[in-house]
């Protein structure tokens, strides 16, 4: 069972959540200084990390697992978040330039199938960053944060999983070296822990980040199937709306300039 979207939203308003957002955003900003004129997908719960890119990017879409629930996120085109299945994303192949996965992999019931789907919807030479709990860090051992749920990863485990799905890992790094304690995660203290940890304890970060690229020569032939599924609007409730029909209307409008969602599955094998 995944963490609920309500719990994730509450966490990112807490002192620990603010520290996590700041430290991950610092790392992500070094990898992706800007995403101007790019189509971006956030899978899991990427709102805290992708929100600042929304003005410059051509589009930012938030795909949230149905077991988690979705928080409605608005843009000038309407709602840009939708409930989806882990292994059946409602997008055509080769749509997105960048994909961020946060709170998406640790509790995925079918991790290989999810990574295969993310590979499918990315453009050739597109980049993906996965943020996950570090199995050697303190945050994976704490029940106070969502990072204590599901299975944590080492950097090499994430890299191996990405390779299996046809990605080529490029960068591996860590973030969030402060302990998961409110008193230790103030802005100044968290920054100090970050600098100290990067120098002295690089392998003991709370989170691990791996960036990889989609290279066609590294992929498997089955990735490019033209399989489309409609978004799932049942299951856990969507925050901020009272009718799932409204979500269907607005998400269709939000994604029109990328590729229209299909009513039925297609398979051009």
Image: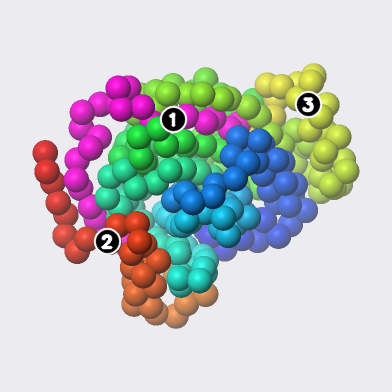
Closest to the observer: 70 or 30? 30
Alpha carbon separation for disc pair 2 and 1: 25 Å
Q: Position of residue 97 (x, y in %)?
A: 43, 43
Q: Which residue is mark 1?
A: 213
- Where does the image place residue 10, in percent across and percent down from the top left? 65, 61
Stretch of the chain drawn in magenta? 208-235
Q: Viewer-nearest of labels 1 and 3? A: 1
Numbered label tally: 3
> Which residue has dot 2 on it?
261
- Disc 3 or 2, which lies upstream in sequence? 3
Task: Decide: few, some or many residues near mark 3? Use Cα within 10 Å; few <14, some 14-19, many ≥20.
Answer: some
Q: Which label belongs to residue 246?
A: none
Q: Residue placed at 63% from the left, 55% from the top?
A: 52
Q: Is residue 217 visible?
A: yes
Image x and y of residue 93, in percent: 28, 45
Residue pictured at 46% horizontal, 57% vertical: 59
* Magenta-span inclusion, residue 228: yes
The colour scheme is rainbow
Answer left or right for 49 relative to 220.
Answer: right
Residue that appears at 42% across and 24% down = 168
Figure check: 222 above or below 90: above
Task: Determine the CA span between mark 1 and mark 3.
Answer: 27 Å
Residue 24: in sight, yes or no? Answer: no
Residue found at the far front of this picture: 37
Residue in the image at 33% along x and 64% along y = 256
Q: Residues within 10 Å of mark 1 (few under 14, many from 20)?
A: many
**In the rendered view of the protein, which quadrant contains the C terminus?**
top left
Q: Which residue is mark 3?
A: 197
Residue 141, by quadrant, is top right
């Amino acid at each position: 069972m995944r963490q609920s979207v309500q719990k994730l939203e509450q966490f990112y308003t807490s002192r620990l959540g603010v520290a996590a957002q700041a430290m991950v955003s610092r790392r992500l900003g070094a990898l992706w200084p800007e995403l101007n004129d790019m189509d971006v997908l956030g899978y899991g719960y990427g709102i805290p990390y992708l929100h600042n890119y929304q003005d410059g990017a051509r589009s930012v879409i938030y795909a949230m697992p149905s077991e988690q629930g979705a928080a409605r996120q608005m843009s000038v085109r309407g709602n840009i978040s939708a409930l989806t299945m882990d292994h059946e994303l409602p997008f055509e192949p080769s749509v997105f330039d960048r994909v961020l996965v946060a709170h998406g992999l640790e509790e995925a019931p079918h991790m290989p199938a999810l990574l295969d789907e993310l590979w499918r919807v990315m453009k050739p030479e597109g980049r993906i960053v996965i943020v996950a709990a570090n199995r050697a860090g303190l945050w994976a051992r704490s029940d106070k944060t969502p990072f204590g749920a599901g299975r944590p990863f080492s950097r090499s485990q994430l890299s191996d999983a990405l390779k299996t799905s046809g990605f080529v890992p490029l960068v591996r790094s860590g973030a969030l070296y402060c302990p998961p304690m409110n008193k230790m995660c103030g802005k100044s203290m968290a920054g100090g822990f970050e600098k100290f940890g990067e120098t002295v304890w690089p392998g003991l970060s709370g989170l691990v980040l791996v960036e990889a690229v989609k290279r066609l020569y590294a992929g498997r032939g089955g990735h490019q199937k033209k399989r489309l599924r409609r978004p799932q609007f049942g299951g856990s409730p969507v925050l901020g709306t009272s009718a799932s029909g409204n979500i269907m209307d607005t998400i269709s409008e939000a994604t029109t300039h990328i590729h229209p969602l299909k009513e039925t599955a297609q398979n051009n094998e």
